[in-house]
Amino acid sequence: METSRRTVLTAAAAAGLTAAAAGPAHASSYASSGTAGVVGP
């Protein structure tokens, strides 16, 4: 149970770092799509 929770948190952290690394252009894409953390067109 604890292991799966840690895996989820690690995956979430990795996704956050990826989004941060993508830069402001992608951040505005997230905002316009209304779904943070999901890569949209």
Image: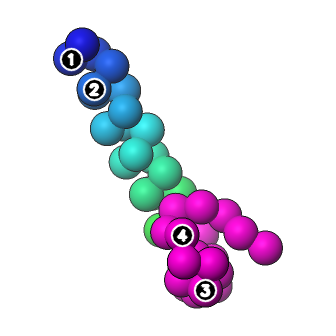
| Count of numbered marks | 4
Query: Disc 3 designates what residue?
Result: 32
Which sits earlier in the primary sequence, circle 4 or circle 2? Answer: 2
Which sits earlier in the primary sequence, circle 2 or circle 3? Answer: 2
Q: Amino acid at mark 3?
A: Ser
Q: Residue furthest front?
A: 34
Question: Badge 1: how crowded within 10 Å, few (<14), some, or many (20+)?
Answer: few
Q: Position of residue 4 (x, y in %)?
A: 33, 19
Residue at mark 2 to residue at mark 3: CA–CA distance = 30 Å
Q: Position of residue 20 (x, y in %)?
A: 47, 68
Q: Amino acid at mark 4?
A: Thr
Determine whether 24 is above or below 2 in the image.
Answer: below
Mark 4 falls on what kind of element? loop
Determine whether 19 is above or below 26 in the image.
Answer: above
- Of residues 17 and 31, which is closer to you in this image? 31
> Which of the numbered marks, if any, corresponds to residue 41?
none
- Range of magenta residues: 22-41
Query: Disc 4 designates what residue?
Result: 35
Mark 2 falls on what kind of element? helix
Which sits earlier in the primary sequence, circle 4 or circle 1? Answer: 1
- Of residues 28 and 33, which is closer to you in this image? 33
Query: Disc 2 designates what residue?
Result: 5
Q: Position of residue 35 (x, y in %)?
A: 54, 69
Determine whether 7 is above or below 32 in the image.
Answer: above
Mark 1 falls on what kind of element? helix
Residue at mark 1 to residue at mark 2: CA–CA distance = 5 Å
Residue at mark 3 to residue at mark 4: CA–CA distance = 8 Å
Query: Disc 1 designates what residue?
Result: 2
- Determine contact: label 1, label 2, CB under 8 Å: yes
